[in-house]
Amino acid sequence: MDWWQILLIILVSIVIGLLVGGLLSYLILRLQKKPFFKERETTAVVEEQLESTAPDLLAEVENNCRIATEPWMDELLHFQTHVWDTNQDEVHRLTANLREDLTQAYLDMRQANGIVWLSTELGHRSHTLDEHYMKVRTRIAARLERIMPLLKGSGN
């Protein structure tokens, strides 16, 4: 007998063994009235976490919208990004358009927060930075006002 024939017999034996083992497992579980494919117990925990995160994300977006739309009082206000930063798994459940708009809004918020940081931590404040902050703030307000009804409608 050649080596390839021995190898073929071994491979066929393994495949037949796997099929017979799978069939026996299925029959045993079927007789015990248990599902063949068990769902993870963590699924329920993850769903609870996602449901509890959704109101937090909406609250953060609403607060950031309030910051972006309130009248300018010559004060550079810091935007909140904690919920967005810590719950990226939640973001993937959103529609592609909503996710993209939120991502762009949060990129603008990071830019605005960078200007706030320059102003407060380094004590560097100028008319040019204020103008740039106002432009970014206007973009954030426009995006968030467009996003909020969609975010509320998506259940998130």
Image (cartoon, rainbow, N blue to C red):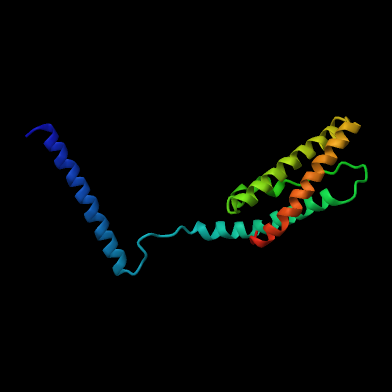
Image position of 30 (left or right of 151)? left
Residue closest to the far right: 73
Residue 150: % across, % down:
68, 58
Q: For the N terminus, give its image quadrant.
A: top left
Q: Residue at x 29, y 61 (%)?
A: 26
Of residues 76 and 71, the one nearer the viewer is 71
Image position of 54 (left or right of 70)? left
> For residue 94, what is the image quadrant?
bottom right
Of residues 90 and 127, the one nearer the viewer is 127
**In the rendered image of this protein, does residue 150 appear above or below residue 123?**
below
Q: Residue at x 72, y 56 (%)?
A: 148
Q: How many marks?
A: 0
Q: Residue at x 74, y 49 (%)?
A: 143
Of residues 36 and 71, the one nearer the viewer is 71
Residue 54: % across, % down:
66, 57
Q: For the C terminus, give its image quadrant.
A: bottom right
Image position of 77 (left or right of 1)? right
Residue 64: % across, % down:
78, 50
Residue closest to the far left: 1
Residue 149: % across, % down:
71, 59
